Amino acid sequence: MPAPRQRADAVRSREAVLDAAEELFARSGPAEVSMNAVAAAAGVGKGTVFRAFTDRTGLLQALAERRSAPLRRAVAEGPAPLGPDAPPHERIPAVLDALARFKLDNQSLHLALEESGVSSPYASPSYTWWHTTLRDSLARCTDAGQAGFLAHALLAAVRADLIAHLATVERLPFDEIRNRLTAFVHSVLPDTPRA
């Protein structure tokens, strides 16, 4: 069943809220911005923000979805190494590398999402999409029963809090993080693809 169509003014209001949140977050970071401030900057009532996004986590998730749309398109439809036709041994490390870069580039947003604690990150539509994408690629080169667990384990390696810890506390350059991530991915993949 297709999702119900939103009224044009609701779509405009939603986009105005996302634009305002982008601008405010760029100045202060997501942790410092209230829903009231976002509503005021968007020129809408606080109720409009809550109707569109339910809560702060919903707003953060929508913003993350908006920012990640080009990457998700490249993974869903693009050419190798990210695209669906790439061999799993090329695609899986490439997808995780791109996702790690995206989390680093959008660190404050993803840290705010991970720290929100309102609901399980494993239940979010974004996590489900990334998990399904990795699971399906993993199922092409390993036991299908193990693919789901491996997808979770690999996604844990690109959590924003881990990337931030490695970059700021352990002071690893991003190229070193990428190298270690790639080595980890290859250590859990079988040596040869399944026939």
Image (cartoon, helix red, strand yellow):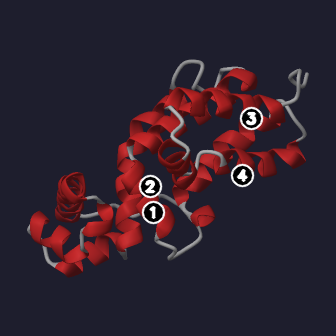
The answer to whether the residues at label 4 and label 3 have Cβ atoms under 8 Å apart is: no
In this view, which residue lies farthest toward the bottom?
47
**What's the CA distance linking mark 4 and mark 3?**
14 Å
* Pointer 4 local density, CA inside 10 Å: few below 14, some 14–19, many at least 20: some
Residue 7 horizontal/vertical position (percent): 23, 64
Residue occupied by mark 4: 152
Q: Amino acid at mark 2?
A: His
Residue 155 horizontal/vertical position (percent): 65, 47
**Looking at the rendering, which quadrant does residue 19 occupy?**
bottom left
The answer to whether the residues at label 2 and label 4 have Cβ atoms under 8 Å apart is: no
Q: Earlier in the sequence, mark 4 or mark 3?
A: 4
Question: Can residue 3 be spotted in the picture?
Answer: no
* Pointer 1 local density, CA inside 10 Å: few below 14, some 14–19, many at least 20: many
Residue at the image position 25 percent from the left and 57 percent from the top: 25
Residue occupied by mark 2: 110
| Discs 1/3, front | 3
Would residue 145 appear left or right of 59 to someone viewing this image?
Answer: right
The numbered disc on residue 113 is: 1
